[in-house]
Image (tube, rainbow, N blue to C red):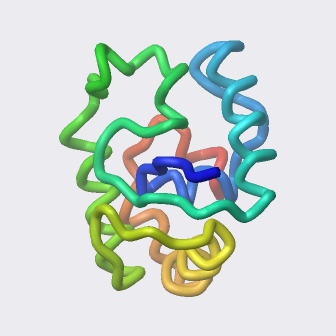
Amino acid sequence: MQYRIRAHHGMCFSFFQGKGYSGAFTEHMWAMKRKLAQNPEVILLAEADDVCARCPNNRAGVCTSAKKVEHYDTQVLALCGLNCETRIRWEDFESLVEERILAAGRREEICGDCQWSALCN
């Protein structure tokens, strides 16, 4: 199986605690987390993805905060040395995010203005 994943979601899954925009979104995040734990190939994006499918901010495939989250995506891709449409195993991407962003203390500079940022400290 292969999943389409926004690059910044590589950080979100590291901190996900079961809180979210709605019950349906939270359930979907848990389901995606279980699927990604199987280490599938993912296609990295800077647009709505398989996670966004149940987000109430997803309006016909476009995020209501599109410019803000696209900025998160492009920063994650740049720091990880990757591009949009890169195909990579989830665990390899997760390791890059951990090493180059989270362990390097760069998460807040990327998404410190996110409404969920306090959960990631």
Q: Quadrant of residue 108?
A: bottom left
- Check the image and report above or below for 20 versus 67: above
How far across and how far down the image is residue 15, in percent?
69, 53
Front-most of residues 8 and 102? 8
How far across and how far down the image is residue 14, in percent?
68, 59
In the picture, measured across the screen, residue 99 lies left or right of residue 29, that is left
- Check the image and report above or below for 73 versus 109: above
Q: Residue at x 43, y 42 (%)?
A: 114
In the picture, measured across the screen, residue 51 lies left or right of residue 6, that is right
Q: Residue at x 55, y 81 (%)?
A: 96
How far across and how far down the image is residue 62, in percent?
26, 26
Q: Quadrant of residue 36?
A: bottom right
How far across and how far down the image is residue 49, in percent?
43, 39
Q: What is the residue that sits farthest to the front in this orientation?
A: 1
Front-most of residues 20 and 33? 33
In the picture, measured across the screen, residue 57 lies left or right of residue 5, that is left
Q: Residue at x 64, y 51 (%)?
A: 1
- Check the image and report above or below for 92 versus 37: below
Q: Residue at x 80, y 45 (%)?
A: 34
Callout count = 0
Q: The C terminus is located in which quarter?
A: bottom right
Q: Quadrant of residue 93?
A: bottom right
In the picture, measured across the screen, residue 40 lies left or right of residue 106, that is right
